[in-house]
């Protein structure tokens, strides 16, 4: 398992930047992703996967302690869908060759289809 502290450590070492700066970068990325989901945006990181909100309708559930029926309110929850390249890497398949046109993206692009074209993304 990799946790946030370990991710910060890896970024600090591989980028040759101070841990504090790496922590700021990681926090900025996570905060920006969370804010995008709060605003109802989809997050797509090519070669990795996408995050979307899924709507769940209200339903009748049961309190596990008492067995009493309860009404569960409708809700939205974030959902991650793994990308094809990541799925294949985890499965032990070799990454696509650089000559493959479908693998020409860097894997670090964020797609924000709900944003207006040409408008800078708001991070507030």
Image: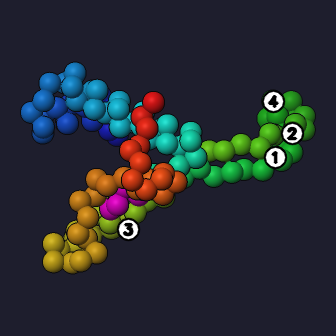
Image spot of residue 69 (x, y percent):
90, 38
Q: CA distance from mark 1 to mark 2?
A: 7 Å
Q: Nearer the viewer, residue 33 or 1?
A: 33
Give the alpha-carbon distance from disc 4 to disc 3, as whole Å: 41 Å
Tell whether 9 sits left or right of 71: left
Residue 42 seen from this side: no
- Residue 4 locus on image (x, y percent): 33, 32
Please give the residue where the numbered disc 2 appears in the rendered image: 71
Q: Mark 3: which secondary structure?
A: helix
Q: State which tag comes first along the sequence, 1 or 4.
A: 1
Query: Which residue appears farthest toward the front when viewing the image?
Result: 118
In the depicted structure, whether residue 72 falls above or below residue 113? above
Image quadrant in which the C terminus is located = top left
The residue that mark 4 highlights is 65
What segment carries the magenta color? 44-49
Q: CA distance from mark 3 to mark 2?
A: 38 Å
Label 2 packing within 10 angstroms: few (<14), some (14-19), many (20+): few
Residue 9, relative to residue 103: is it above or below?
Answer: above
The CA distance from mark 3 to mark 1 is: 33 Å
Q: Give the label on residue 84, or none.
A: 3
CA–CA distance between discs 1 and 4? 21 Å
Q: Report the residue marked by disc 1.
A: 58
**Secondary structure found at label 2:** strand
Q: Mark 4 and 3 residues: CB-CB less than 8 Å, in contact?
A: no
The disc placed on residue 45 is none
Q: Are marks 1 and 2 in contact (CB under 8 Å)?
A: yes
């Amino acid at each position: 398992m990799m946790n946030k502290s370990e991710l910060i450590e890896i970024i600090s070492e591989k980028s040759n930047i101070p841990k504090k700066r790496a922590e700021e970068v990681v926090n900025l990325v996570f905060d920006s992703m969370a804010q995008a989901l709060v605003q109802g945006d989809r997050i797509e990181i090519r070669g990795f996967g996408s995050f979307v909100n899924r709507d769940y309708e209200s339903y009748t559930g049961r309190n596990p302690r008492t067995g009493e029926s309860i009404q569960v309110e409708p809700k939205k929850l974030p959902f991650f869908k793994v990308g094809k390249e990541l799925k294949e890497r985890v499965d032990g398949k070799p990454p696509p060759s650089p000559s493959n046109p479908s693998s020409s993206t860097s894997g670090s692009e964020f797609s924000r289809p709900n944003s207006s074209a040409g408008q800078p993304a708001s991070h507030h």
